[in-house]
Amino acid sequence: MRKYFLLCLTIFIIGISILIPIKGQAMYLIPDKIRVGLYYDSSARSSYQLYSGSGFRVGFTTDLSVISLSDKLLKVYGANSMDFVPKKNNIRDKNIAMEYASQLAQMGIESYLIFDDDWSVWTKSSNKTTISSDFDLVVVKGDSQNPGLIFHSTIDKPIFLSSSNTTSPIAIEGRQYRGILEMGLISGKSIQVVNELGLDEYLYGVVPGEMPPNWHIEALKAQAVAARTYAVANLSKWQKYGFDVDASPSDQLYGGYDVEDARTNQAVDETKGQIIIYDENPITAFYHADSGGRTEACRDVFGLDLPYLQPVDDIVDVNSPYSNWEIHLSADDISERAKAVMQSVGEINEVSIIENTLAGRVKKLLVKGKSGEVIIENSNIRSVLQLKSNFFNISGGSKLDVVSITGDGIKKNVKLNGKNIIAQEGLSHISTGYASIAGANLFRNINLNTTDNTYIFYGHGYGHGVGMSQWGAKAMAENGYNYTEILSHYYTDVEIAL
């Protein structure tokens, strides 16, 4: 597929982006740089420890004034301007300000440089009483006698820190990252941290966190393309925070430089620039650990009816640790796990599936108690009850597993234990073990050994079930399928933009 390349400027640091028109007028953006939220909102802190073996470069992202620090260890923290007093103002030259600050350091006076159109030298205030607990400054201080730095920095005007050797990683709170770290005050209480780096450098830190590096290279390449596509399709998701993607599994798990592996880096490099497209646009490339044999329609999990995210069967036996699983929960366990959504249903006496998706996963789960009932739906079922997937059935509990309906429409719950049934083999007495009950659109195995207080959730797969199954990709790769065939199987009617 032919590509046309245009150059554009990024907002903060000059970078290259690629605009690619496909089949007509539609265009999508593959950025050269990506911004990853490391610490923000409630995860943001008031201070951080940074390390660089080659020293640091520090400055404003929108200004060419950069200060080099020989310190290998830095502390960056929020402070109030009342904690400092100006010692000398209106210094036009950075070197003159540095020299004056060094003279103060030789006299045992801790000094700080601040740049705001011109340079000033400040020292710590002798007044120990701070009027406000809010921060209006970001302070950068090394582990030597060198002067510290003070910035009026916000997320709209962040400072950046990088290693003096720009090819070396920079560490914050003990974890190393490529690229630069941008830092700015949020709400006067904490400092937001964003990692800006190359898109493929970002993927170096994503792919090994999402898929084991020792898996087949074709599976790793499928993961690399899916992860790149997801990032490109979600560039505006966190716009209000000033970055593109989150470092947590809410987007893609990004572990930075420390998790990189030669094999996953190879998978990223060998698929450079490749993304998955549908109707000339990048897809939302959801993926998950194990489909349990069949993936799920996006509309039944996330409420989005996307034509390329439809149910498909695994075409190779997966045999993963999650192919079959079983979890025993008492009524009290369920009450504790689901208390956030249970309201006040009282003592639980029934947990039952009332609706499944077309692919077979549980869409609605009814929990009845002595004081009421509640319906738990879709992804909340898995997250609230802490299950591996929504692909499950339930047995046990109160054993109200069968409902008889009389001629006049009266429904009656039937306990199976101790009943006689007529099967192919003749009359059978149900006492222990499992019974299989078949009905309209329903097939359930019922465990007759459990107590009335225990429910058994037995299911298949791991994760939300939408898009590519990672264990399915592994099995396909090991059976001779290449990464484009893997992606074309799990994402319906898509193209791989090469």
Image (cartoon, rainbow, N blue to C red):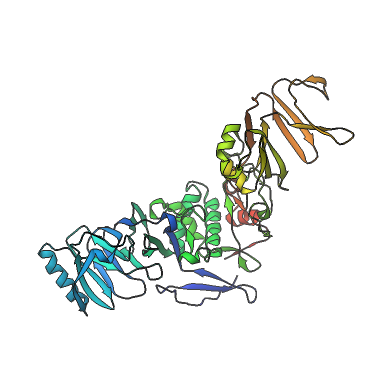
Q: Quadrant of residue 452?
A: top right
Is residue 165 visible in the rendered image? The answer is no
Quarter of the rendering occupied by the C terminus: bottom right
- Residue 383: where, in percent of width, then height? 57, 45
Decide: is 476 above or below 425: below
Q: Position of residue 66 (x, y in %)?
A: 28, 72
State whether residue 300 is above or below residue 496: above
Where is 389 relative to 197, above or below? above
Question: Looking at this view, is 159 or 293 the one in front?
Answer: 159
414 on left or right of 251: right
Q: Is residue 458 left or right of residue 147?
A: right
Please tell me which residue is depicted at 40% across the width and 67% down the height of the picture.
Answer: 155
Image side of residue 29 versus residue 295, left or right: left
The N terminus, quarter of image: bottom right
Tally of numbered discs: 0
Residue 159 in the image: x percent, y percent? 34, 68
Residue at x 54% of width, y 70% of height: 29
In the visual, does 411 lie left or right of 162?
A: right
Where does the image place residue 308, in percent across and percent down from the top left?
67, 59
Q: Foreground: 272 or 280? A: 280
Instruction: Decide: is 245 above or below 211.
Output: below
Residue appearing at x 51%, y 72% in the figure: 18
Q: Going by the picture, which residue comes out furthest to the left?
A: 107
Foreground pick, 261 / 289: 289
The residue at the far right in this view is 407
Question: In this rendering, does residue 43 appear at all?
Answer: yes
